[in-house]
Image: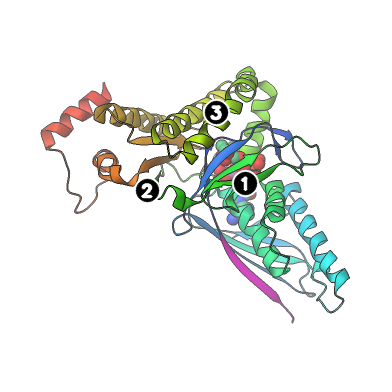
Amino acid sequence: MTLFVASTTAPVNIATLKYWGKRDKTLNLPTNSSISVTLSQEDLRTLTSVCTGPEITEDKLWLNGSEESLKSERTQNCLADLRKLRMKLEDEDSNLPKMSKWNVVIVSENNFPTAAGLASSAAGFAALVMAIAKLYELPDSLSEISKIARKGSGSACRSLLGGYVAWEMGEKADGSDSKAVQIAPMEHWPNMKAAILVVSASKKDTPSTSGMQLTVGTSDLFQHRIKDVVPHRFVEMKQAVLEKDWPTFAELTMKDSNSFHATCLDSFPPIFYMNDVSKGIIKLCHFINAFYNETIVAYTFDAGPNAVLYYLEENESKLFAFIYELFAEVPGWDSKFSKDELTQFLSDFDS
Ligand code: ADP
Ligand code: DP6
Ligand code: CO
């Protein structure tokens, strides 16, 4: 049996200016531009292996050890685009194996909760498209590959690039100008860090794709968001990143998370992605910033209850003094506060 295999990993990216809403469902063209930070692959990542050969009888996808349907239009669109690019190479060089005609088996694993609002579709489709591009030996055109990943899941187009990434919504009906571009590499702001607070690892009841369709169709607030809020926030956030203006970046990030969740609540019937623990985390972050009279932390929540906290490395112990005391028993953690002080903070926080 002749088999060809390739593997790759892809990182998660967490939006600080949220993509929520499509103007074209098939091409995954968004109703607004968005901004995200691609996290280090050492933490959250998808690992995907693909294999093809003339004897494989059908396309198959194994996700986290279970077989998933490969029938969805989005996966089919990605496969069709990749096969088309491979076919071009085969037409140019008749010695190449005719991989474009063969089925593929895709085996993927996320090392973090899937479909729980931690961008599994972003890392997942970025890895799927990259792995097949590698298998097909397609020329390295990240921008081309990123547009194919976008058709799998909108947010996936941002995971192909590192650091601070903008997804420019574009204007064209064919999506040729709807693409991810790097605002700055990770090293531009080396003391920026992210912490993930897993509130629930369960699969959400409203997937992002259907959630945003409902919002587009029913929320008046959403119209205000895409017309009057996001366009100038996009410019301001990009500038805050370029100038490493932490307080502005942090404020815009928190406000945009709240604005996105407000449009979910304004959908009909409403969508609740955050739970009481998520809301407690929001309250805690504002409490911490007020306590130090300085912006220590910025929260953001994707379509799920799990929190991503952005902070500057030099403030790590100030932030985790609270997080560890409130949420985790950390062996060896040396509290900066006395028991009396903590009891006081907690009673202030609860009130
Ligand atoms: P999330 O908030 O995790 O991105 P979504 O609702 O956007 O949740 O997407 C979840 C879906 O993305 C999963 O149900 C699955 O269909 C797809 N997905 C997640 N991880 C992978 C992966 N590694 N490979 C292929 N598809 C994936
Ligand atoms: C809240 O990219 O998962 O995480 O394009 O339908 O697959 P589809 O949706 P998806 O939506 C992400 C929504 C978000 C915000 C963001 O990542 O920008
Ligand atoms: Co997603």
Using the image, determine if residue 180 lies above or below residue 257.
Answer: below
Dominant secondary structure of the residues highlighted in magenta in the image:
strand
- The picture places residue 83, in percent across and down from the top left corner, at 80, 61
Residue at image point 63% right, 61% down:
62
What is the secondary structure assignment of the residue under circle 3?
A: helix
- The picture places residue 166, in percent across and down from the top left corner, at 59, 41
Task: Give neighbour class at mark 2: few <14, some 14-19, many 20+ (Cα, 10 Å).
Answer: few
Using the image, determine if residue 84 lies above or below residue 24.
Answer: below
Using the image, determine if residue 277 lies above or below residue 137.
Answer: above
Residue 65 in view? no
Residue at image point 16% right, 28% down:
344
Tags 2 and 1 in contact by the CB under 8 Å rule?
Answer: no
Tell which residue pokes out farthest to the bottom in this image.
1
What is the secondary structure assignment of the residue under circle 1?
A: strand
- Queried whether the magenta region covers residue 232, the answer comes back as no
Q: Classify mark 1 as within 8 Å of ligand 2 or not, answering yes or no.
A: no
Q: What stretch of residues is rendered in magenta?
A: 1-9
Residue 181 bears which disc, if any?
Answer: 1
Q: The disc labelled 2 sits on which kind of residue?
A: Asn
* 10 lies left or right of 105: left
What is the secondary structure assignment of the residue under circle 2?
A: loop
Please report whichever mark, 2 or 1, sits nearer to the chain's N-terminal start: 1
- Real-space CA distance between mark 2 and mark 1, rounded to the nearest whole angstrom: 22 Å
Residue 191 bears which disc, if any?
Answer: 2
Residue at image point 21% right, 53% down:
331
- Real-space CA distance between mark 2 and mark 3, rounded to the nearest whole angstrom: 23 Å
